[in-house]
Amino acid sequence: MHPLILISASVLVGILFALQEWMNAHRWGYRISVLFLIEMWGMQFLIWGAICWLMWRFLRPFIVQANIVSLLTRALPLSIATSILEEMIWVMFFPRVPVDRPPMDYWHRLSFQLGAEFVDSMAIFWCAFLFLRGVAYYQQFREKETAAARLQVQLVQARMTALRMQLNPHFLFNAMNSISSLMRTDVNAADQMLEQLSSLLRMTLERGEVQLVPLRKEMEFIEIYMAMQQQRYAGRVQQRVLVEPELHDALVPALILQPIVENAYVHGLSRCAGEGELSIDIRRDGKRMRMSVVNSGKGLDLERGELPRRGVGLANVRDRLQLHYGERGSLSVREMGSGRVNVTIALPLQLEQNGTQEAARFDV
């Protein structure tokens, strides 16, 4: 509804009417200048275009809300006045019209023009009125649709933020317990673990409320976390991390792996009598990415293939995958035999825009 676009479109309609009248006159043997017809029709619809924009600019609430009473008591008188005003302006620009009559003064020409064109002007006004009313209804519909979509996005963002915030105290509580247990056996290791914990907390604060992060940053976080656990387990866990290089810039939900790795230590590796094994394998699978975490331990206490429902970790990951990706994201848990458990996340592959090729330091 920009005035330039609205008025230009109105003038174009006038030109089309002018060409139609010229073709009809030519068919019936009348000789009349096509430029003169374009000038007359173009000016008429130029005026109507300006009137339409003024109505849209100043009368939009009335156009949208008008009922039958206001249409009869206000819109009808307005249509009469507007039609007369339009003819008054048009007659000023064309003193030679009507061309087949002797010269007349302004008021006689206006009277003649009203007698010939008043009904047409009224029809144009009401067509414009209904057109503007339809556009206003459409805009209201789109605004409501956009507002509903924005509220839905805000709701999802709030739920994802709440889930993220749920992880922080859970992770912090477990980490502090680990540091506390080390304080009785190895003070230096506990001090180093405390420094690593401060690094993790700083990284968490720097991310703020960002929901999706490049995989390289997620792996930097996991690298420090696994180094903390190495301090606690005194090298009894063999760690292996494999990430395909092209996936360093893939976007993943922040802190999506940490609860799974934490579960691997708490529910699996901590129950190993001897050495344990933890491996992280992240690969591309067509247009999807699969992130697998395998740990040794005592296996699952649940039926094979059943997703655990208790605890913050896996339930949190499952809920966040659902919010981010719907049915396109999945989390599966299965036992591989000999007490080894495999947790796999599958999600759509989405690369960071203008991402760098910086790789994470996988040296744990």
Image: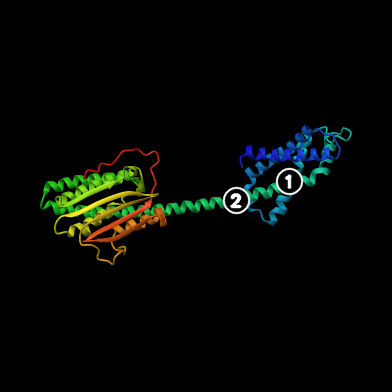
Of residues 66 and 328, the one nearer the viewer is 328
Quarter of the image that includes the C terminus: top left
Q: Position of residue 352 (x, y in %)?
A: 38, 42
Of the numbered discs in the image, which one, if any, rests on residue 138? 2
Which image quadrant for residue 39? Answer: top right
Of the numbered discs in the image, which one, if any, rests on residue 359? none
Q: Position of residue 344 (x, y in %)?
A: 31, 55
Quarter of the image that includes the N terminus: top right
- Residue at the spot x=20%, y=54% of the render? 277
Q: Is residue 253 visible?
A: no
- Residue at the spot x=67%, y=43% of the render? 52
Residue named by callout 1: 124
**What amino acid type should be assigned to the residue bearing mark 2?**
Tyr
Of residues 212 and 57, the one nearer the viewer is 212
Residue 51 left/right relative to 295: right
- Residue at the spot x=41%, y=57% of the render? 327
- Which circle's residue, 2 or 1, is located before the other in the chain? 1
Of residues 136 and 260, the one nearer the viewer is 260
Which image quadrant for residue 317? Answer: bottom left
Image height check: is 124 above or below 305?
A: above
SS for callout 2 = helix
Q: Is residue 344 visible?
A: yes
Q: Using a 10 Å C-alpha cutoff, classify the residue at mark 1 as few (fewer than 14 neighbours), some (14 to 19) or many (20 or more).
A: some
